């Protein structure tokens, strides 16, 4: 009988436990757990949105800083280029003026040499005068080309200036030498 009482006792406890855990109570706990999960989810979403917004704001600030830095560097480089360009233009203008002065002095000397040679040629033999006349036609053509080059000084770029200057000086010196040779043959 003792076993029967024990079984009855277990059955009573089981019924009491089951009665305490009624379907309505289980449903209330499920609803409560669902609401708690929804609150936790909403909190997590809010926290994630705040973190995303903070990260976006930091990224935007970094982009703005980078743009500002790039703009500052660009303006600095632009100013340096403008300064260097201005200096280069001044140097080129000075080089043009120096060559203009040099060529003016050279042409004055060439013109004197031509005038003296023509005076000399009047007393030269017919053959020497004919050779001299050929030289003078060539000299006139070369001198005209030199005048055209002088007129083009201001159109020459810095990149081509040194080569042009060297070639120009060589042509002036060659004309001067040719006239000197022609005078020597008179």
Image (spheres, rainbow, N blue to C red):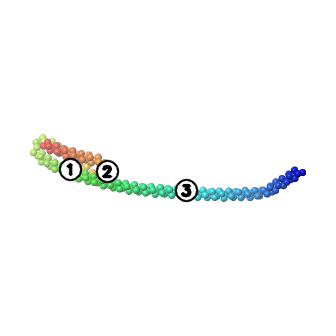
The x, y position of residue 30, in whole percent, is 72, 56
Circle 2 is placed at which residue position?
A: 158
Mark 1: which secondary structure? helix
Circle 3 is placed at which residue position?
A: 55
Going by the image, does 143 lie left or right of 155?
A: left
Residues marked 1 and 2 touching at CB (< 8 Å):
no
Q: CA distance from mark 1 to mark 2?
A: 23 Å
Going by the image, does 22 lie left or right of 2?
A: left
The x, y position of residue 115, in whole percent, is 15, 49
Q: Earlier in the sequence, mark 2 or mark 3?
A: 3
Q: In this orientation, which residue lies closer to the viewer: 99 or 125?
A: 99
Circle 1 is placed at which residue position?
A: 106
Instruction: Please report the residue visible at 18 percent of the width from the left and 49 percent of the height from the top.
Output: 110
Residue lying furthest left: 123
Q: Earlier in the sequence, mark 3 or mark 1?
A: 3
Q: CA distance from mark 2 to mark 3?
A: 52 Å
The label number, if any, that marks residue 77 in the structure image: none
Q: CA distance from mark 3 to mark 1?
A: 74 Å
Establish if 84 lies above or below 171: below
Residue density around tag 3, few if under 14, some if 14–19, many if 20 or more, within 10 Å: few
Q: Quadrant of the C terminus?
A: top left
Instruction: Please report the residue visible at 15 percent of the width from the left and 42 percent of the height from the top.
Output: 131
Mark 3: which secondary structure? helix
Quick check: can you spot residue 142?
no
Mark 2 vs mark 3, foreground winner is 3
Instruction: Please report the residue visible at 79 percent of the width from the left and 57 percent of the height from the top.
Output: 20
């Amino acid at each position: 009988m003792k076993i029967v009482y024990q079984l009855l006792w277990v059955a009573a406890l089981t019924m009491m436990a089951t009665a305490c855990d009624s379907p309505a109570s289980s449903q209330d706990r499920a609803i409560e757990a669902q609401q708690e999960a929804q609150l936790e989810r909403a909190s997590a979403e809010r926290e994630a949105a705040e973190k995303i917004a903070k990260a976006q704001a930091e990224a935007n600030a970094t982009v703005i800083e980078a743009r500002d830095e790039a703009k500052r560097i660009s303006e600095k480089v632009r100013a340096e280029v403008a300064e260097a360009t201005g200096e280069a233009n001044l140097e080129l203008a000075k080089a043009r003026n120096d060559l203009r002065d040099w060529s003016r002095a050279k042409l004055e000397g060439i013109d004197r040499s031509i005038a003296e040679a023509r005076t000399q040629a009047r007393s030269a033999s017919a053959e020497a005068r004919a050779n001299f006349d050929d030289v003078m036609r060539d000299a006139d053509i070369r001198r005209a080309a030199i005048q055209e080059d002088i007129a083009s000084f201001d159109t020459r770029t810095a990149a081509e200036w040194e080569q042009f200057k060297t070639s120009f000086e060589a042509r002036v010196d060659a004309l001067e030498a040719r006239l000197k040779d022609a005078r020597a043959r008179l």
